């Protein structure tokens, strides 16, 4: 493969990485500012993953060209897998943050029900 092809491949992957970063930035900009630090950390990790994968995928170009395997399918499957892992991580951390709040609300409601039932029982006897 001529060196010019490597240059075009690197440019293509760099542009895809920046577009991926821009897409994640747009999606996460709708979330409230309470999770702003988590969002910035997630975007930073995602950008780091994109830049690391650009180097790895550039090195893996030769074997895929030799064996006639579609390189773009390989890139899209890695991208989908990485996005799925990142999405699951973000939803899991977002869910964990809300568990204590909902648990406190549940405890307050349960105590209120118990208190009101004892209060009504003492009124009737």
Image (cartoon, rainbow, N blue to C red):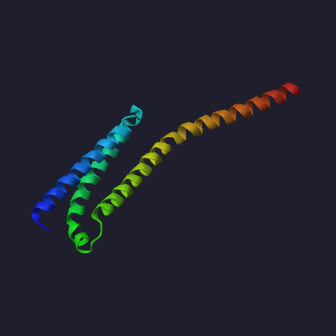
Spot the residue most to the left: 3
- Image coordinates for residue 97, horizontal then vertical, percent: 48, 41
Closer to the camera in the image, 123 or 94: 94
Does 89 sit above or below residue 70? above
Which corner quadrant holds the C terminus? top right
| Figure check: 55 above or below 86 | below
The residue sitting at 30% across, 66% down in the picture is 70
Q: Is residue 79 rendered to the left or right of residue 115?
A: left
Residue at x 27%, y 72% (from the top left corner):
68
Quick check: 19 left or right of 95? left
Q: Nearer the viewer, residue 93 or 86?
A: 86
Q: Quick one: which residue is furthest to the top in this view?
A: 123
x and y percent of residue 11 in the render? Answer: 17, 53
- Rendered image quadrant of residue 55: bottom left
Q: Residue 61 or 25: which is nearer the viewer?
A: 61
Q: Which x, y percent locates residue 58?
A: 20, 62
Q: Position of residue 110 (x, y in %)?
A: 68, 36
- To which quarter of the image does residue 34 belong? top left
Query: In the drawing, does residue 56 fall left or right of residue 84?
Result: left
The quadrant in which the N terminus is found is bottom left
Residue farthest to the bottom, as pictured: 67
Picture layout, residue 116 above or below residue 96: above
Q: Which residue is rendered at x = 81% and y = 27% of the image? A: 120
Q: Quadrant of residue 42?
A: top left
Residue in view at x 41 percent, y 53 percent: 84
Number of numbered discs visible in the structure rendering: 0
């Amino acid at each position: 493969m001529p060196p010019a092809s490597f240059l075009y491949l690197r440019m293509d992957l760099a542009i895809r990485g920046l577009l991926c970063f821009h897409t994640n930035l747009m999606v996460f900009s709708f979330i409230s500012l309470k999770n702003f630090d988590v969002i910035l950390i997630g975007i930073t990790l995602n950008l780091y993953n994109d830049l690391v994968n650009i180097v790895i995928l550039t090195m893996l170009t030769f074997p895929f060209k030799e064996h006639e395997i579609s390189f773009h399918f390989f890139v899209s499957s890695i991208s989908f897998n990485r996005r799925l892992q990142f999405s699951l991580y973000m939803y899991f951390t977002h869910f964990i943050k809300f568990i204590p709040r909902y648990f406190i609300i549940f405890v307050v409601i349960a105590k209120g029900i118990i208190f009101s039932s004892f209060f009504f029982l003492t009124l009737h006897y």
